[in-house]
Image (tube, rainbow, N blue to C red):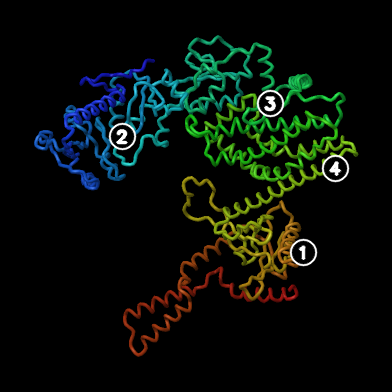
Amino acid sequence: MADNSVLTSTTGRTSLADSSIFDSKVTEISKENVFIRSASYVEEEMPQIETRLILVQEAGKQEELIKALKEIKVPFVKMESPEEFESLDSPEFENVFIVMDFQDSVFNELHKTDYRIIGPPVILNCAQKGEPLPFSCRPLYCTSMMNLVLCFTGFRKKEELVRLVTLVHHMGGVIRKDFNSKVTHLVANCTQGEKFRIAVSLGTPIMKSEWIYKAWERRNEQDFCASVDDFRNEFKVPPFQDCILSFLGFSDEEKTNMEEMTKMQGGNCLPIGDERCTHLVVEENVVKELPFEPSKKLYVVKQEWFWGSIQMDARAGETMYLYEKANTPELKKSVSLLSLNTPNSNRKRRRLKETLAQLSRETDMSPFPPQTPKSCTKSSKNSTPVPSKQSARWQVAKELYQTESNYVNILATIIQLFQVPLEEEGQRGGPILAPEEIKTIFGSIPDIFDVHTKIKDDLEDLIVNWDESKSIGDIFLKYSKDLVKTYPPFVNFFEMSKETIIKCEKQKPRFHAFLKINQAKPECGRQSLVELLIRPVQRLPSVALLLNDLKKHTAEENPDKSTLEKAIGSLKEVMTHINEDKRKTEAQKQIFDVVYEVDGCPANLLSSHRSLVQRVETVSLGEHPCDRGEQVTLFLFNDCLEIARKRHKVIGTFRSPPGHTRPPASLKHIHLMPLSQIKKVLDIRETEDCHNAFALLVRPPTERANVLLSFQMTSEELPKENWLKMLCRHVANTICKADAENLIYSADPESFEVNTKDMDSTLSRASRAIKKTSKKVTRAFSFSKTPKRALRRALMTSQSSVEGRSPSSNDKHVMSRLSSTSSLAGIPSPSLVSLPSFFERRSHTLSRSTTHLI
């Protein structure tokens, strides 16, 4: 499609002619004028010409505009009609006109006379930034496209192109006829042509014409910039615009996924064989022959074209990805090797294994394609020398070296195919992932790669210069400290790394396409990034097994026997350290989860020495730590016990701030209790009226007497006996006591008035609901905000002040209100009538029951 890049307006000036030509001519004329002036008036002083702004019609009535002109200290005058300009014209001033509307007759008349014209946003922008007025030989309404260089392609209608070019100039943009490296944006009306292909190869944003129109609509917004990512991305030409795709050789699930991606990226899908299709995307590893003869207009491309277009965020060139029939035996063999992980019949798998076994015998080929980039690893030495008599020890050593070499190749593949391209600056279409996401995914993989590259090189030197007395154990002892340093940061956060990959793949189509492209490459062996990243987790146990096997085939008199034992012990220490560090990391993470889950959780719960031991779901059986029947969650830590209740339903919704996906806290903090405050753990015996109950005898430092906390366990995963033993053990550790069993005391439920009868009955639930409602009503009419003593003092003062005189009407009103309110507060609530007698009786019973416990 031809590019209409040069259009001539009625005035004889080119509308879309290369702006640089016009600008260069202006520059040359100005240079010539300067030269002529300097030659003619060498001894004369140049006259000073001052810029003056002329506010035309409505512009002179804008107070904000006049205020901005005073700030930038530029002289200005007001003008109602162009006829007034003759009286204002003066050689001492360079006149610049401020016009509110660039489409009315006044603007057209001024534009014909080649005067400088600017819009109000230019003045306001200069005043805000404290900058001088920009010079522009064309009318400049705003600066939202300042410093942008645009090129157009695919536009056939002259009127539309002239309109777009004019708007770009009014917003400060520059137009180029030919596409070059200085062009910042290509405005395209089609996805073909030379300019489009160059823009894709250079990574230049390709925009729709709507981008210019929408930017012009926002011309009066002072801080608006048309090139800002959030605005620009709305109008980028999608990769599959004007494309109709069909798919061949894919599974139903993958085909559905690709069709959804096609529609998201601006394209459409039709069944195979439809004449309207523009592209047929083929799974080249499955399809041997096409089911029909494609037309000349149909592009038959590999799936890499599809995913590559999404990754680049632009339609890739089809010629690089054309599908070719797989007829040659070599190509068929490579395809079969790439399909190691594809599901086939057992017979095919068996035949493939036999083929690979034969290949490994003939060429000693690695099971993982050793196509490691040169920048990641040294070139291996020549073929490994084979001793005349291959001992069992040499065979194991050779296997250790080969697996280490394969492992290094995998790490190099992860770095070169995945990490480096994601970290690369200037990616087409912008960064695929944020730096934090890249760091979370790959972690310390480069450090692990460096250590194992050194191990692999040392093993290679040992195998090349093989001798039965050579020590393999020394190699792993040499790098044991490096292994301890590099592995824990990766292993500890592997699950987080995997979750990040899955989340980004779902939310970011370009990252999904990036993974698809690389997974199809021979270097990956058709394995996903998650499958490759699990190798470091598996490597050290595999090395330990091989070293054990090597030790079995090492003679007793060989000095490497003892060294191998030390190396195996060192590797076990490394794995133990990794597991312990992983356990600590997970425990720390669990503490953060508790803090997020419990509303009002104290900040001092977060501590480097603290770890979560067990979580238990219970129901409160007494009045402490909360009302009877409340659902209570106990978080046992190694030195404290966090008690939280289930949050009650609140009228109204509380939404999280934008960008926060964490659900609201489901629990409410009650008390954070050090384990040292627990004096006894009561195992309540099982009876008909009491099941799965226990109690804690607690002595808070602020209380003079013991407090009894009774609970019923509701979770069935953990037996009560195990929970109580676990709790006592950590209490004993906290108070430095060896006999944790002595902290448990078996008790009858009657002696402590503990029962679980009818806890889940309808009557019990209704009673608790009435009790909560009664408490709310009592709080609503209580004087809790005013202390009782202060209220009594106020009453006494008011009484003493009126002694000896008759109360006034106002005093009577106050006294009547106080008496009525006090009488209302004195009305006993049905659920609170027996509370005083209950507390007296309960405290008496508790003191009697616990006398012999302490």
Of callouts 3 and 1, which one flags the residue occurring earlier in the amino acid sequence? 3
Marks 1 and 3: in contact by CB < 8 Å? Answer: no
Gap between marks 1 and 2, in whole Å? 77 Å
Q: Secondary structure at mark 4?
A: helix
Q: Nearer the viewer, residue 96 or 555?
A: 555
User: Which residue bears the numbered disc 1?
Assistant: 740
| Residue drawn 82% across the image and 24% down it | 386
- The answer to which of marks 4 and 2 sits earlier in the sequence is 2
Q: How far apart are the two marked residues, 4 and 2, measured between alpha carbons?
A: 80 Å
Task: Identify the element where label 1 is drawn.
Answer: helix
**Residues at marks 3 and 4, CA–CA distance in whole angstroms:** 34 Å
Depth check, front residue: 320 or 484: 484
Q: In the rendered image, which residue does mark 2 sit on?
A: 217
| Badge 3 or badge 4: first in the primary sequence | 3
Residue depth check, mark 2 versus mark 3: number of the one nearer the observer: 3
Q: Nearer the viewer, mark 1 or mark 4?
A: 4
Residue 178, compared with residue 813, is above or below; it is: above
Which residue is labeled 4 in the image? 562
The residue that mark 3 highlights is 370
- Left of 743 or right of it: where is 161? left
- Work out how far the residue at label 2 is from the one at label 3, CA to CA, in angstroms: 57 Å
Give the residue type that dot 2 points to. Glu
Which amino acid, mark 4?
Ser
